[in-house]
Image: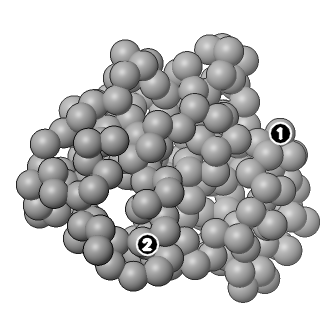
Amino acid sequence: MKKRCLWAKDEPNTTYHDEEWGAPQHDDQKLFEFLILEGAQAGLSWTTILKRREGYRKAFSNFDAKKVSKYTQKHVEKLLQDESIIRNKLKIHSAINNAKEFLKIQSEFGSFDNYLWGFVNHNPIKNKFKKLSDLPASTEISEKLSKDLKKRGFNFVGPTICYALMQAIGMVNDHTSDCFLYKK
């Protein structure tokens, strides 16, 4: 039996933990997906979002930022009726807005990956937490990232959301030291 981080005790969390969480991600489309999903999670559990992930993929054009950036009020109205996602008007508008800002960063930095990973000098930070309660909700780096994203016009990108994004895409390795993925 594999020893996992304590939060990964059931599906869909176990599969997400084993296959994605904390693994360095550099594909811009996947980075956009995590940006949107982390924003959607605000005030909710990650399990709630994981269970709706396929709905989000379908509703948000498989996280194609160019397509999402062109969504109109008609799209918003349709999304507000879509039970496969979180039907929160602010979060839906945020996803569309963030798609537009995402494209600007891609243009400025060559990729969102270059921009995002620059906050950790393009190398994952490997933390050494022994238990789940040791993990911070935010860090100095996530606060800097949040501040810069907000300055650029992004929404739903507070320091806690940014830290969750950093964990999800492997900018930080927050697997607890007893987890089988910690050394990987």
Please state the horizontal and vertical placement of residue 25, each as a whole percent of the image.
Answer: 53, 38
Q: Residues within 10 Å of mark 1 (few under 14, many from 20)?
A: some
Horizontal side of 149 relative to 107 (left or right) equals: left
Can I make out residue 39 in this image?
no
Q: Which residue is mark 2?
A: 13
Residue at image position (86%, 64%) is 75
Total tally of numbered discs in the picture: 2
- How far apart are the two marked residues, 1 and 2, measured between alpha carbons? 29 Å
Dot label at residue 66 = 1
Mark 2 element type: helix
Please state the horizontal and vertical placement of residue 36, each as a whole percent of the image.
Answer: 60, 54
Mark 1 element type: helix
| Mark sitting earlier along the chain (1/2) | 2
Amino acid marked by disc 2: Asn
Q: Are marks 1 and 2 in contact (CB under 8 Å)?
A: no
Colour scheme of the rendered structure: one colour
Please state the horizontal and vertical placement of residue 141, each as a whole percent of the image.
Answer: 28, 31
User: Nearest the camera: 32 or 146?
Assistant: 32
Task: Tell us which disc is closer to us: 1 or 2.
Answer: 2
Residue at image position (27%, 31%) is 125
Horizontal side of 182 relative to 103 (left or right) equals: left
Amino acid marked by disc 1: Lys
- In the displayed structure, 126 sits above or below 87; it is above
- In the displayed structure, 5 sits above or below 97; it is below
Residue at image position (34%, 29%) is 124
Q: Quadrant of the N terminus?
A: bottom left
Can I make out residue 179 in this image?
yes
Indicate the quadrant where residue 105 lies: top right
User: Nearest the camera: 114 or 67?
Assistant: 114
